[in-house]
Amino acid sequence: MEKVAKAAATSGQRLTIDAHAKSGRVPLRGLAQMRGAAIRDFLVSREADPDRITVNTHEQSNTRIAIVTPIRVPHVYDPPQSYTDV
């Protein structure tokens, strides 16, 4: 996260934080929001511009992660070799 914070502070590029909270039938919106806010607060404490950070929450996700990506940079998924071996 230190590298991301340094890049965010020096580049001036907009960032998106996708905060996920694993849940079943009950949405965990609050947990996803807290996860995203914690990352945003960390980046801002390292001098990233808060106006350039967007937080999206995914409360009925299948995972417990947060993903930070620059805006307008396409996300490319490279599946592991075992998925592509035929």
Image (spheres, rainbow, N blue to C red):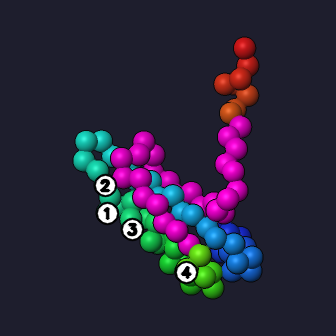
Residue located at (67% from left, 48% from top): 75
| Highlighted range, magenta | 53-78
**Mark 4: which secondary structure?**
helix
N-terminal of the pair, mark 2 or mark 3, is: 2
Query: Is there any visible trace of residue 2 in the rendered image?
Result: no
Q: CA distance from mark 4 to mark 1?
A: 20 Å
Q: Which mark is residue 34?
A: 3
Spatial CA distance of label 2 from label 3 is 10 Å
Type of the residue with mark 1: Gly
Q: What is the distance, in whole Å, between disc 3 and disc 4 at their CAs?
A: 16 Å
Labels 2 & 1 near each other (Cβ < 8 A): yes
Residue neighbourhood size for the residue with mark 3, other residues' Cα within 10 Å, grouped as few (<14), some (14–19), many (≥20): some
Alpha-carbon span between mark 1 and mark 3 = 6 Å
Q: Are marks 4 and 1 in contact (CB under 8 Å)?
A: no
Q: Residue furthest front?
A: 72
- Marks 1,3: beta carbons within 8 A: yes
The N terminus sits in image quarter: bottom right
Residue 68 on the magenta span? yes
**Is 66 drawn above or below residue 62 in the view shown?**
below
Identify the residue position indicated by label 1 in the image. Answer: 30
For image coordinates 56% across by 84% down, the residue present is: 45
Label 4 vs label 2: CA separation?
24 Å
